Amino acid sequence: MGQRVSVAACFLAILISGTAVPAHAAALDLSAYKGKVVYLDFWASWCTPCRLSFPWMNQIQEIYGNKGLVVIGVNVDHDRELADEFLQANSAHFKIVYDSNSAIASEYDFKDMPTSVLIGRDGKVHAVHNGFYPNREGSYAADISALLNEKAP
Amino acid sequence: MQLKKKRAGQIRESLATFSASLLTATIALHADAANAQQEYYNPEYGVRNDNFGPGIAYTELGAALLVYKESGGRVQAIEPATDLSVHGPDGQLLTFDLVADAVSGATPNGAVPSDQTQTFVTPVKIRGASTGGGTTTVTSASGGSTIIHLPSTPGQVTTSARQYTVAANLLPMDKGFHDHRLAFSFGYEQPIGGISLVSFGGGYSQEQDYRAITGNVRIAQTFNAGNTTVSLALNTELDSSFPYGGVPTPLTAMNGQWKTPSSRDKTQAGFVFGLTEAMARRWLMELDYSYDAQSGYMNDPYRVISVVDHVTGEPTSTLYENRPNKRTSQSLFWDNKFDLDPAITDLSLRYYRDSWGITSKTAELSERINLSSSMYFEPSARWYQQSSANFFHSFLVGGQPLPTYASSDTRLENFTSLTYGLKLGVQLSGRTEVYVRGGYYQQTGNGHPSDAFGQLADQNLFAGSKAAFVFLGYTWDFH
Amino acid sequence: MQSPIKRSVSIITVCVALALLCGACASFGPKPWEKDLMARKEMQLNLHPLQTAAEEHIYFSKEASSGGRGFAGGGCGCN
């Protein structure tokens, strides 16, 4: 009985820690994008699905940019050289932020690579996309559209 | 592998030619194909082409060749193989595997060496047989055996048999056996709903005197941010042994008669419970627990055991062996990979025990070191030790009651083996790799057990082998 | 000595408990952004399955024990 309670408590702890979101992401200052929808994508040179996500993120930045979408690619490589090589092969037409000491990654504490965090005009996290699947691009875009249609507070 | 006596020696040659041409054709076809994919180079990580990996659909084709040769004119084998892996964009994987092997050479028949010449008789089928008496010498394809005429006895149809002699003080071996095998297997896996992986697969293997059909299913779940994977696999197998000469009655005298029944079956069922865990940034490990249950015919139909005189130790008769018709086994396997610059270390340990009284321990270590951005070498060593089966006997003593089960097969004996290997790999481009691995395998055991008496005390009773092998492999990725 | 079935059940229970406990530690092991080295081809547990199969065939023909190896996970854990 005591075992079950402690296991349940453990699972509850994971659940809470998994969904906890910092009110202010101190490591990454998003105040400049207040009122805009931010698509925060965590990527790395060694992440193969990222090679597929970059062309799509270029697309959505171009299509939804004037509606208030800001795509930010947060690179988590330890080695800056590897990130630069990746960017040479897969050009990014969106803002890139380097997080080599994993401070931003730790704050958002995501579970997959790549992970995209959708931050609404209210500055709060509304959705998280775990991994990148080309056949889900439609639903990803739908999530973004929904957030763009909300008015800023 | 079952021992077999067969005539054609050309199978080995044609398989060698086939495999060599397959390898060269595959390499030639793609070595000069321009690598259109974006490829970049980093001194630390070497040539990389990340267009092959999770989330990206690609296909990998592999071709390989194993050449194996034991010392002392014993078993040699050549084994070409090929596999195809088709990766889908959403974690689907379809695999096909094809292996062929041709085995030949001499193999110990299980009898003890003697200080006198020994003669052994086995069944043989002669085309248009049973005319006249006398002996006919068959060419070296049968390893220096002679065909003899059996006196006809009421009720017995067989009139010819194959006879071979073994000189004094030599380990009795049946030369000129051939066997070839073709095996095919396939598998399919994909995630379903919330389950990380569901898979099923099957296989079929056919030899001249043996057939096996296998099936397996597996389910796996990954969690803990991709660090932990837990899996359960169930596997089953149906084997059929149809030895040349028929299935001998166990513990009866070795003879040249054609025997009945012509075949016997064996069934197997088992499961593997696996845990893969990323322990740290530089440490990945895998822990597997396997359980296996076999039921049916597990004898080696060609293997015999000597009955010796209780004073002199001279072999007086030769009997077909017998093993229990049930066997359950368990093993615990632990594999670790450490990325410790400049080498990547692989250390694996396995503990095994079964209901035949055999326990074994295995330890294998390899170190992969990059020589340049596209080349690596990997020395390795494997240590293995097993205890003997509880029905293992090097010989039986005349006058004593026969045990229910008895076998002198080295495979069931107490021994230690060491394997030394060196592998060299070259990344030819971002999508192709070629590698070669050379190995030396050696078994050591007690050739002079304390219970050896008479002439047996002067003989080496351990029939273990030493072998060298070379393995060539080539992989090619494409979209 | 426990019967083989009881023993295997207790081993599996321990393994599952360990796995669950690891999960309960709010992600044991490297963080997803720390899996750069795991993503390397050389860190796969069974990189050359044809070679492994050929060697297992040699050992199976000469020795009493067979198998043991399961099905590896690992890698970068992407997607």
Image (cartoon, coloured by chain):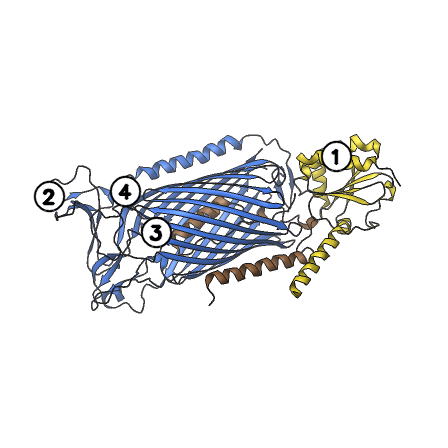
Chain colours: A yellow, B blue, C brown
Q: Looking at the picture, do discs 1 and 2 lie on one chain?
A: no
Q: Disc 2 marks which amino acid?
A: Gly
Marks 2/3 in contact by CB < 8 Å: the verdict is no
Residue behind mark 3? B71
Residue behind mark 4? B6
Q: CA distance from mark 1 to mark 2?
A: 90 Å
Marks 3/4 in contact by CB < 8 Å: the verdict is no
Element at label 2: loop
Q: Disc 1 marks which amino acid?
A: Ala
Q: Looking at the picture, do discs 3 and 1 lie on one chain?
A: no
Residue behind mark 2? B133
Specify the subunit that label 3 lies on: B
Residue behind mark 1? A141
**Mark 4 or mark 2, which is nearer the start of the sequence?**
4
Q: CA distance from mark 4 to mark 1?
A: 67 Å
Residue B56 lies left or right of residue B463; in this view the side is right
**Mark 3 or mark 2, which is nearer the start of the sequence?**
3
Q: Disc 3 marks which amino acid?
A: Ser
